[in-house]
Image (cartoon, rainbow, N blue to C red):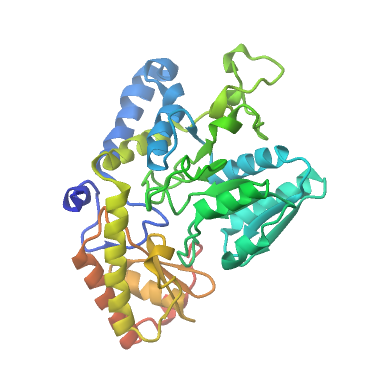
Amino acid sequence: MTDFTATRAMFDLPDGVIYLDGNSLGPLPRGVADRVARTIADEWGKMLITGWNDAGWMDLPARVGDRVGRLIGAAPGTVTMGDTLSIKVYQALASALELRPERRVILSDTGNFPSDLYIADGLCRTLGRGHTLRTAPPEDVAKALDDSVAVLMLTEVDYRTGRKHDMARLIAQAHDMGALVVWDLAHSAGAIPVDVTTAKADFAVGCSYKYLNSGPGGPAFIYVAPHLAEDARPALSGWLGHESPFAFEPDYRPAEGVARMRVGTPAILQLAALDAALDVWDKVTLEDVRQRSLELQQKFLESVEAGCPELTLASPRDPAMRGSQISFRHPNGYAIIQALIARGVIGDFRAPDILRFGITPLYLSDQDIERAAILLTEVMTQRSWDKPEYHRRAKVT
């Protein structure tokens, strides 16, 4: 059984802050600062360019990829790290479309993260071969799947509401229809149990700065199923995806397996931060994390609904249908969140009216959840949010 008191001690949390925004940016694990400092001083500082060999920098994308792979049910050697999630979505989607040349439809849902939809639309325009992006309401995706679909592209957990797709069922249905699947794990990896192997995922992508706590701008990851890895052609054919990058050949030859999905020079400081952050996961199981998350979610949900009748639940009421967050709706959601942040409870806002709270048991306790609900109730009952400074929008909401 996971000791969540011990995992809490592994995070450097500011005094007086209850952090309910780890679903957007995870907090700082205690070992990360020292690890990055050593990478800077002892490796970059003393080894200079020899660090690529002597410090093992060149192997970090694969080695850290295997550590992330363990959390998503991927076999060793099937996950690599680097770039941003948007780039990895582009790579996976472009590769999948090329593997289904006779089809022209990308199917997604209307609740998907806008960046994924923008990338899909832009790729359709770039290809110029009649590809189209089709979206359906999240609950209607299964009905929208037909034999015209080349790729089903879904984010498992809705970034606004926390609604969770049944990905195993949808992947099986897509395969029955002859389609491939790109599975976005941005709000799944490190939050809920994931098994890309058992679910027979084709491609999976995700970021590391949310539940995996790698820090702002942390590297993304991509998984390619082994049976597709030698046929998937990376749309971004970067030099480090070459079979022999230091041969500096004029023509591209893809590396074996998922290594071909590497693009440019890896961000070593970010990878070092992620490598250290992943140490937390050596002490927990995702099954325990999921069980504890649902317990804390239910406590928060019951307390908020009892004290804040003006807030409307936006997340599914069925806990099995939720990721690791609880969301509510209110026309003045932005101002409410700002008033709550001023009281030391950090959640976030998503347009047009979503108050979003990430429930991450690695560092949240029953007392945190109770206190957060009490303060939210005070903000609502006293209308503390209705001040000019709380309505003033910042660049990042």
User: Which quarter of the picture shows residue 355?
Assistant: bottom left
Residue at (30% x, 33% y) in the render: 35
In this rendering, the answer to whether 68 lies above or below 116 is above
User: Which quarter of the picture shows residue 251?
Assistant: top right
Residue at (66% x, 20% y) in the render: 253
Compared across the picture, whether 184 is left or right of 131 comes to: left
Image coordinates of residue 245 in percent, x first then y, are: 59, 18
Image coordinates of residue 169 in percent, x first then y, are: 53, 54
Q: Is residue 28 visible?
A: no
In this rendering, the answer to whether 256 lies above or below 138 is above
| Of 237 and 148, the residue lying toward us | 148
| Of 97 and 269, the residue lying toward us | 97
In this rendering, the answer to whether 14 lies above or below 276 is below
Residue at (29% x, 77% y) in the render: 302
Query: Looking at the image, which residue sits at the far front?
Result: 176
Compared across the picture, whether 187 is left or right of 117 comes to: left
In this rendering, the answer to whether 165 lies above or below 89 is below
| Number of numbered discs overlaid on the protein picture | 0
Query: Looking at the image, which residue sits at the far top?
Result: 247
Compared across the picture, whether 265 is left or right of 270 comes to: right
Image coordinates of residue 171 in percent, x first then y, are: 56, 50
Residue at (63% x, 28% y) in the render: 238
Query: Looking at the image, which residue sits at the far right?
Result: 129
Image coordinates of residue 55 in percent, x first then y, are: 37, 20
Q: Is residue 113 visible?
A: yes
